[in-house]
Amino acid sequence: MKIPRCPPDIWQIIDQRGHEWREAARDSAYLSFIAEQEQNHYRHWDKIRHVARGQGLDPELAWSLIKFSRLGQSRTTPFQGLTGEKVRYATPDTVVRELHLLDQQTAGRIAADTDGLPTGVERERVILRSLTEEAIASSLLEGAATTRHEAKEMLRTNRRPRSRGERMVLNNYRAMLYVRAHRDQRLTPALLLELQEILTTGTLDDPDQAGRFRTDADTVDIADAYGETLFVPPPAAELPHRLDTICAFANEPNKDEHFIHPVVRACLLHFQMSVDHPFCDGNGRTARAVFYLYLLRHGYWLFEFMPVSTLIRESPSRYAKSFLYAETDDYDATYFLHYNMTIFQRARQQLLEHIERRVTEQRLAVHMFDADPSLNLRQRQLLLKAMKSADRVVTIESHAADYQVSYQTARNDLLNLSSRGYLRKFKAGKQYQFVQGARLAELSETR
């Protein structure tokens, strides 16, 4: 990955080209360019220089005006970059718009749509499925050598992992469950250690690196696929102070006079955890777990349904560049915020589409088998899936995992369907498996 060029020093530009700079600051072409960039984008010098030149503007003057405007709108945080720079951020229109929609749909439209979101056991099932997707995507993002299908099958059937990649997925899943269970706990270095240990146990070349912070004896550099060093974390001796700052930032009350939107604060925690890189391995996964922990603690239950890492994995280079842009531009974390808002926007849309599909499927499952009222909702939903896919294989274990019921309940569901011809039972080794039966095949043909 190509490291972005560091932007020019705007104060040097203003000092050396003061008259030109003041003229540009009154030029409608420059003013229109700045307004368009700040309203719809948050571009780095690496891109601004090309876009400005393409519009006939002087890149340095355009950049210095944009940067000057950003400095006037930015806020500092207690966090530090590698050499003591204060991490800062701004909330441009694109960020504010997405924060508004997240708030509105978390407490408004989705929460009020009782026919849309599942409740009770069904809600838990959907959440656990989302956590499964998050665990898989987060692991694949970190280089787990497995496939999504194999990983999902492992979690569904509760079988033991067969490879290091599958163990990474299982660890991620357990960490997400841990986050749900400990959402009300204060963030502490001990909690961070516990999270990292859950995430990395059984996946490291050196098992001693699980459950401990890195030391000066550890060499931890971030490189791209070609071996080029992208990032060298701060010295290990600074970690105690840096981690205390992270925990204090996560635990402090969000007072009116220093209010930071909870989603912004969660993103800043994610960002700084990645900058400080407190562990030898598992830093990205731990940072994303802290992000979820903070949001769930502050009532953003919507994120339980949003496997964010799935979307990050579709374009990991953009995720990495959001950090590099911030690092090369005086630790302006707005690049990371802006990137995350684009991910949240897509995740929200996918969630709404998923809810609509779930509602349609549930209503169809209820009415499809009206002639047989003895079927429970689990059985109806299972039969609907089996009707769509004649070669779909179901086991007692997978049915229990899918619907969060006991083994005996799942067994009763499947044996009942088998005895009535909806499913066909056969034995594979020591395990019973079920596929579409003759009665269901007939229903499929007459549908």
Image (tube, grey):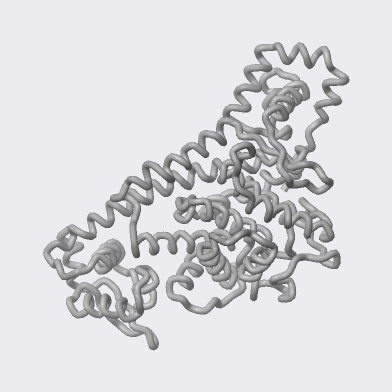
Query: Residue 388's image quarter?
Result: bottom left
User: Looking at the image, which is closer to me, 184 or 62?
Assistant: 184
Residue 140 in view: no
User: Looking at the image, which is closer to me, 375 or 102?
Assistant: 102
User: Looking at the image, which is closer to me, 242 or 11?
Assistant: 242
User: Looking at the image, which is closer to me, 422 or 73?
Assistant: 73
Q: Position of residue 225 (x, y in %)?
A: 71, 56
Query: Residue 277's image quarter?
Result: bottom right
Q: Position of residue 368 (x, y in %)?
A: 18, 59
Q: Position of residue 399 (x, y in %)?
A: 35, 72
Residue 237 in view: yes
Residue at the spot x=61%, y=65% of the render?
A: 144
| Residue 11, above or below 205 | above
Quadrant containing the C terminus in the rendered view? bottom left
| Residue 178, above or below 284 | below
Q: Position of residue 191 (x, y in %)?
A: 64, 65
Residue at the spot x=64%, y=60% of the render?
A: 286
Residue at the spot x=61%, y=70% of the render?
A: 198
